[in-house]
Amino acid sequence: MLKIGIIGGSGIYNIQGIVIKDRKKIITPFGDPSDYYVIGEHFDKEIIFLPRHGLRHHFPPHKINYRANIWGFKELGVERILSISAVGGINPVLRPGMFVVPDQIIDMTKRRESTFYEGEEVVHIDFTEPFCTELRSAILKAGEESGIELQKLSTYVCVDGPRLETKAEIRIFMNMGIDIVGMTAIPEANLAREAEICFAIISVVTNYAAGITGEKLTTTEVMKVMNGSTKKLESIIKQVLLFIPDSRGCACKYALKDARM
């Protein structure tokens, strides 16, 4: 059975309509993942769900054990991961409530464990295309089928947090051509690539980034938009599951080929 992982972000802790079969605790060489992996079924696919911040939302972005999370998916046999995240909109056309499927990413994090290879083995993965093109295609088709507008060809910048950004930082990001800002896509994306797992993101714009409107940013605003987007997210996720092919035709499964020194 095809196994698909889903990482739930702020406000996304389960998906209605998916039959839950089991919950598994995984022990990894890198410590404990954020929570139990919830295992369910949707048609002929096994869905493995993990709340990124824990069910109690007690792990801030800079404290998430990203390596353990991705390692756990790999151990459970997952070949694709769909990540859901809340982001701030830098590009003024991206309004709160809009969905974005980024195709590029810029890493502005400073203190995160971002590789599985810290011993004698040296690995340099190709990250020219940081998100799986095949999985992104399935998401975009699902958007068309669901009648949900998805913004594509967008650049995501990942910062450490947990504080929100200054307006000067956002101004720099805007001048760099960046569209959205978030705190979790790195190192999820590159760790998934090292694990040879397909990875793509559906980002929900929950607020305009600092300085865009001049208003104070609040977590209340973020959660309000995420909660209001839940049904649309669940709808598109279930559509994505229908469009994911049984066999992988992308390069993700060969990511370590020619990557080792």
Image: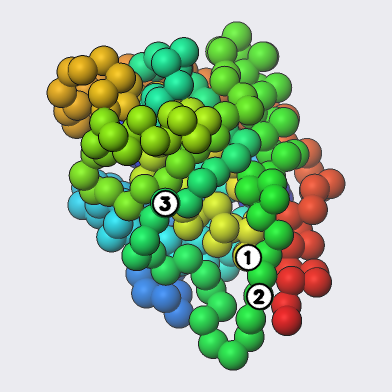
Give the mark nearer the N terminus: 2 vs 3: 3
Nearest-to-viewer mark from 1 and 3: 3
Depicted 77 relative to depicted 18: above or below: below
Q: Amino acid at mark 3?
A: Met
Taking the image as shown, residue 31 lies to the left or right of residue 120, namely left
Q: Can you see residue 145? A: yes
Question: Exactly how many numbered labels are in the figure?
Answer: 3
Which residue carries the number 3 mark? 108
Taking the image as shown, residue 99 lies to the left or right of residue 127, namely left
x and y percent of residue 106 in the render? 51, 46
Q: Which mark is residue 194?
A: 1
x and y percent of residue 48 in the render? 52, 49
SS under mark 2: loop
x and y percent of residue 165 in the render? 27, 38
Q: Amino acid at mark 2?
A: Val
CA–CA distance between discs 1 and 3? Answer: 19 Å
Q: Residue at x 80, y 72 (%)?
A: 258
Which residue carries the number 2 mark? 123
Answer whether labels 2 and 1 touch (C-beta < 8 Å): yes
Give the mark nearer the N terminus: 2 vs 1: 2
SS under mark 1: helix
Q: Residue at x 63, y 48 (%)?
A: 130
Pick out the residue farthest to the bottom. Answer: 120
Depicted 23 relative to depicted 20: above or below: below
Q: Can you see residue 8? A: no
Foreground: 74 or 67?
67
